[in-house]
Image (cartoon, rainbow, N blue to C red):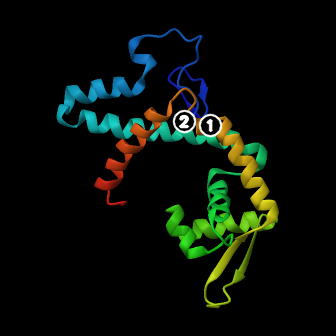
Amino acid sequence: MRDSVKGARVPYGGPVTSPDTPQSSDTRDPIAEARRQWSLRWPEHADQMAAVTSVMRAQQLLLSRVEAVLKPFGLTFAAYEALRLLAFTRAGALPMGKMGVRLMVHPASVTNVIGRLEQRGLVTRAPSPDDRRVVLAAITDAGRALAEEATAALHGADFGLPGLDPAQAARITEALRAVREVAGDL
C-alpha cells in the first residue's frame, strides 16, 4: 500500500478515490492532471507520458482484479497461465524452456512457478525421454481440473474487464499490439 496525499492508505491496484470523496476535476483522474502538468512543460511528450502511465495503471488494476478471482484457487496469474498453457498442449507437457518463451517470462520465473505448482501436486517435472538435458513440466489431473475451475471463474469475471464489450476489448488488444511491435516484442 502507498500513502495518498491525505494520508489514507490506498491498496495497490485499488481505486485512487472512494465514492464518498469530494471530487474535483484534478482528483478524479491523476493521470489527466499529470498530462496537464506535462503539457505545460514538455507538450511534445505529454501524450506519450499519459499513455505509458495509463497502461501501467491499467496493468495494476487488472492484475489486482484477476488475482482476486484466482486467490480462492490458491493461484497467482503466473501460476494460472502456466497451468492453462500446459492444459492447452496435446500431451499436457512442455519443456520448461519453451514454457518461458510462450509465457514471455525469464526461465527462473518458470522454475519458481512450476516448483510451487509441483508442491501442490498440480504438475510434475521429469527429464525428457528424448533429451535428458531437457526438463518437462506436465499437468496432472488435479492441475487440469483446477485450471478449468479457475478459467470458469475468470470467464465469469470477464477477465477483470466487466462492462467492456468484445469489440472494445479487441480495440485495446490492437492498440497494445502496436506498442508491442514498436518495442520489438513481435
The quarter of the image holding the C terminus is: bottom left
Q: Residue at x 63, y 51 (%)?
A: 77
Q: Return the residue at label 2.
A: 61
**Any part of residue 120 in sight:** no
Q: Say which amino acid is labelled 2.
A: Leu
In terms of secondary structure, where does tag 2 sit? helix
Task: Identify the residue at horizontal 54%, vertical 36% (top origin).
Answer: 61
In-image side of 185 versus 84 (left or right) = left
Q: Quadrant of residue 62?
A: top right
Residue 177 left/right relative to 140 = left
Q: Examine the image and state in which quarter residue 176 appears.
A: top left
> Going by the image, does 129 lie left or right of 27?
right
The foreground one among 160 and 9 is 160
Residue 180, given in percent of the width and then of the height, sits at 36, 53
Q: Is residue 86 left or right of residue 7?
A: right
Q: Could you tell me residue 183's position as x and y percent? A: 32, 56
Q: Is residue 117 above or below residue 71?
A: below
Look at the picture and state if 13 lies above or below 91: above
Q: CA distance from mark 2 to mark 1?
A: 6 Å
Amino acid type of the residue that numbered disc 1 sits on in the rendered structure: Arg
Q: Which percent across, then down, holds residue 132? A: 65, 91
Residue 93 is drawn in which quadrant? bottom right
Residue position for label 1: 65
Q: Is residue 8 visible?
A: yes
Residues tagged 2 and 1 counted as in contact (Cβ below 8 A): yes
Residue 91 rendering spot, x and y as whole percentages: 68, 73
Farthest-out residue, front: 90
